[in-house]
Image (cartoon, coloured by chain):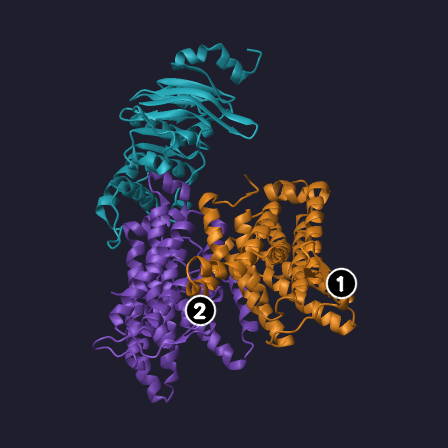
Chain colours: A orange, B cyan, C purple
Amino acid sequence: MNFALLFEQLLNGLQFGVTLFLMAAGLTLVFGIMNFINLAHGSLYMVGAYLTLAAAKWTGSYLAGVALGLAGTLVVGMIVEVVALRALYNRDHLDQVLTTFGLILFFNELVAILWGRAALFASVPPFLSGHIELFTGSTYPLYRAVIIAVGLLVAVLLWYVVTRTRLGMLIRAGATNRTMVAALGVNIRLLYTLVFGFGAALAGLAGLMAGPIYNVQPGMGELILIQVLVVIVIGGIGSIRGALVGALIVGLVDTLGRSYLRPLLGTMISPTAGDSAGPALASMLIFLLMAVVLALRPAGLFPPRG
Amino acid sequence: MLEVRGLTKSFGALRACDGIDFDVVEGETHAVIGPNGAGKTTFISQLAGDLRPDSGSVRLDGADITALPAPKRARLGLARSFQITSVFPDFTALHNVALAVQARSGRTGFWRPARSDPALIDPARQILKDVGLENRINILAANLAHGEHRQLEVAMALATEPRLLLLDEPMAGMGIEESQRMIELLSRLKQTKTIILVEHDMDAVFRLADRISVLVYGRVIATDSPERIKLNEEVRRAYLGEEV
Amino acid sequence: MFSGRALLWIVAVAVLIALPPAVVALGQPFYIDLVRRIMILAIAAASLNLILGYGGLVSFGHAAYLAVGAYAVGILGFYGFTSGWLHLAVAVAASALVALAIGAVSIRTSGIYFIMITLAFSQMLFYLGISIEEFGGDDGMRIKTPSRFPLVDLADPVVFYYVALVLMLLSVFLVFRIVNSRFGMALRAAKSNEARTRAIGFSPYPYRLAAFVIAGAMCGLAGMLYANHTRYITPDLASWQQSGDLMFMVILGGMASTAGPVLGTFALLLVEELLKGWTQHWQVILGPLLVLSVIFFRRGLAGIFYKPDA
C-alpha cells in the first residue's frame, strides 16, 4: 500500500472532517441551547460562500472578501433569527423543520436570482496556493492544510469559550436548564440571537473555505447538511465534543471509503464488483455507520444530558 | 404478593431510594407516607417499571420483575395512577377508559371501529359509573375538572383489572368534598383489591390503611399498623422536627 | 340524512368524476394530467398522515418509499418484466421491507433523532440511486412501457385518471378504518400520552413499527403509479425536498383528519402550478408562503371545515 497516498487521503479526511465540524458545532449549539432544529444552516453555509465571492470580486481583495463575507453571514443569520425563527422556539420540532425547509427554498432561489443557477468558480487566493512538503516526501496543497489549521484553531477557541468564559458557562447552563438561566435574569433573547449569529458565522466560514474546493451553487448547503446531521446524530445532539469526534470520524470514513472501497472490493471480490458496488457502498457508508452507532448507543456517542 | 428488597436509586449525588425493603400482602392496603422529597414517587416509579433501580429487586408473587418494562407489568396485573394527572387529553373520559379495557383484552384489530365496540365501551361505562363519573363520560379529558381527573386516573387503573393497585397521591389537589368521595371510593375498592397508597392526606391514610410505611430521605424508618405508627417516636420526629 | 362532512365528500368526488369530460370539452386536457398527479401524490400524503398526523412520528424520509415503488417499476421494466400485477406486488412488498428495515432502527429513537435519522436513511437511498449507473444514475431512467394490466390500459390518460381516483379514495378509506380501529386507537394514544399508554399495558414500539410499514407500503403503491404517470423517474424522488413536500401536504391539509391529505395535496400542488405560471423563480415565493403557513395556520385547511375528531 502506498503510504504517501494513504497519508494524503488521511489529511483530506481531516480537512473534510474539520469543515463538517464547523457546521456541526453551530448546529449542535443552536439545538442544545435553544432546542431548535435549524435545517436552514446549510443555507448559511451557502450564503457565506456567495457573499465572500461577491465581496472579494467587488473589493479586489481576498481578505476583505473574507471579512465582509463573514460579517454578512453573521448579519443574515441574526436577521433570520429575529424575523422568522423567534416565533418558533416554543413550537414542536415538526413546525421548526417545516419552517426552516421553507427558508431553504427561499434562499436557494434568492441566490439563483442574484447569481444564476450555474456553479461559480471560486479560486484559491495566490498567497494560499502552492504546496507544502510532507514528511512522507510528497506534497500537499497549502490551502487544504490551512483549512485544517483554521478548523482546529476554531475547535480550541470554542473549547476555551465554552469551558473558561462566562458566556460559555451560560451556554452550558442554558443547555441543561433553559428556564433557570432565564430566571437568573440573563437576557435570554440576546443570548439566543448571539448564539445563533455565532453558529451562522461558523457555517459561513465553512462555506467560504469550501468554495474553492467544492462547487459554489444553489443547493450546495443541503448536500453537506445531510452529512452534518449524520455527524451530530453520531456525536450526540447538543454536544460540541460529540460534534468534533463525530465530524472527524465521518470525514475520515467518507474520504477513505470513497478512495479505497472500490479498489478494495476489486481485489477482494472482483473488478466488476468493485466498479458497481464500490461507489454505491461508499456513498452509503456514513449512513451505515450511523445505523450501527445508533443500534449500540441510541443517543449518540456523547449525549450531553447523560 | 409484592416483595421489594434493597431497592436503591441515585440521581447523581442524590440518593433518592436507599436500600428499601418493602412488602405487600394480598388483600391489604399498604400506605406509604413521608415528608416531601422522601423519594415516594421515585419508589412508585420503580415498582411500576418506569425507572430501573440501581440495585435491589422487586418480586411479584415470587417472580422477579425488576427488569420488566412498564407495559409488561401492567399486563401482569400491576396498575398505576399518576401523581400528576396523566391521561389522554384529546380523548373523552369514556375512550380513555376504553383504551385501558382494550389493553387488558390483549386483542387488537385493524378494521372494526373501536369507538363503538361494545366489548370495550360497556365495561368502560361501568367502571366510570363505579368511580362516580357517569355524567361526564363524553367530555374530553382535557376539559374535566381537576378532581374528575383524579377519578379518571383511578378508573383507568381499574380498567386493566389489576391485582395490585399503585395509587400515587390520588387525592392530590382535591377539596374537602371531593376527597371524601375519593375516600369512599377507595374504601369500596380496598375490599377486593390489594393497594399501595402513597398519600399526604393523613385522614385518608389512617382510615384506609392496614399498614403504613414511613419513608424519610429514601429509607423506610418504620412499617407498622396505623395506631402504632402514630405513637412511633422516629416518625413523629421526622414529621414534626426535633422538639417533639 | 347525510352529515355535512359526508356531503362535502360526495360533492368533491362528483367534481373529480366529472372533470375529465368537462376539461376535454373545454379543450384543456392538460388538467387531466395535473389532477391525476395530484391524486397520486395524495395517496402518498395519506400514508404519511397515518404515521405523522395520527401516530406523531415525524418522518422526514417518507419520499424514500415513493422512490422504491417507482424504481420497482423502472427496474422490472428494464429487465423486460411489464406485468402490472408484478410491478404492483414488488413495489408494495419492497417498500414494506425497506420501511421495516428503516423503521426497526429509527423507531427505537424519538424526537429530533427520529427526524434526522429518517432523513438520513432516505438520503442514503438517494445516493444509492445516483450511484447505480445501470439504472440511469442521477439522470434517471425512462419508463418505456407502462405497467400492463388486463382490462385496464394505463397508457390511456383518462382510464389512468379514474384508476388513480379510485385508488386515492380507497387509500383514504383504508387509513380511515385503520385509525379508528383498536390498532389505530392504541397508536393515537401513544401519540397523545406515551407514559400513560405504557402504564395501561401497551408497548408503543410494535404499533408504531406496524403503522410505519403500512404507510411505507401504501407510499410504494403511490410510487408505482407515479412512475406510470411521469414515465421518467430520477433518484430525486427520494430526496429530502420531496419528503418535505409530502410533509407540507399533510400539514397544510390538517393532520389527523381524513380529508386533510387530499386537501393539502391539492392546495400545495395547485399553488405551485399557479406560481410556476407566473415566474420560474416560484420557490422564492413559495418558501416564505410555507413559512407563514406554519407560523399562522396551524390547524390546516381541514380545520376550517370541521373540528378534529377525538
Q: Along the horizontal axis of the image, is C145 left or right of B150?
A: left
Q: Along the horizontal axis of the image, is A297 left or right of A204?
A: left
Q: Residue at x 56, y 58 (%)?
A: A255
Name the secondary structure under disc 1: helix
Q: Amino acid at mark 2?
A: Pro
Query: Which of these two is toward me, B230 or A125?
Result: A125
Quarter holding the N terminus of chain B is: top left
Which chain does the numbered disc 2 sit on? C
Query: Which of these two is toward me, B217 or C308?
Result: B217
**Vertical relation: B57 (above or below) B238:** below
Query: Which of these two is toward me, A157 or A105?
Result: A157
**Vertical relation: A166 (above or below) A5:** above
Q: Position of residue A67 (x, y in %)?
A: 76, 63
Q: Position of residue C81 (x, y in %)?
A: 28, 73
Q: Is residue C60 visible?
A: no
Q: Along the horizontal axis of the image, is B80 left or right of A93?
A: left
Which chain does the numbered disc 1 sit on? A
Name the secondary structure under disc 2: helix
Give the mark toward the camera: 1 or 2.
2
Residue tagged by mark 2?
C235
Residue tagged by mark 1?
A67
Q: Amino acid at mark 1?
A: Ala
Image mark for residue C216: none
Quote the CA–CA distance across marks 1 and 2: 39 Å
Q: Position of residue C171 (x, y in %)?
A: 30, 64
Q: Is residue C236 visible?
A: yes
Are the numbered discs 1 and 2 placed on the same chain, yes or no? no
Q: Position of residue C212 (x, y in %)?
A: 36, 55
**Vertical relation: C35 (above or below) B180:** below
Q: Residue at x 41, y 50 (%)?
A: C105
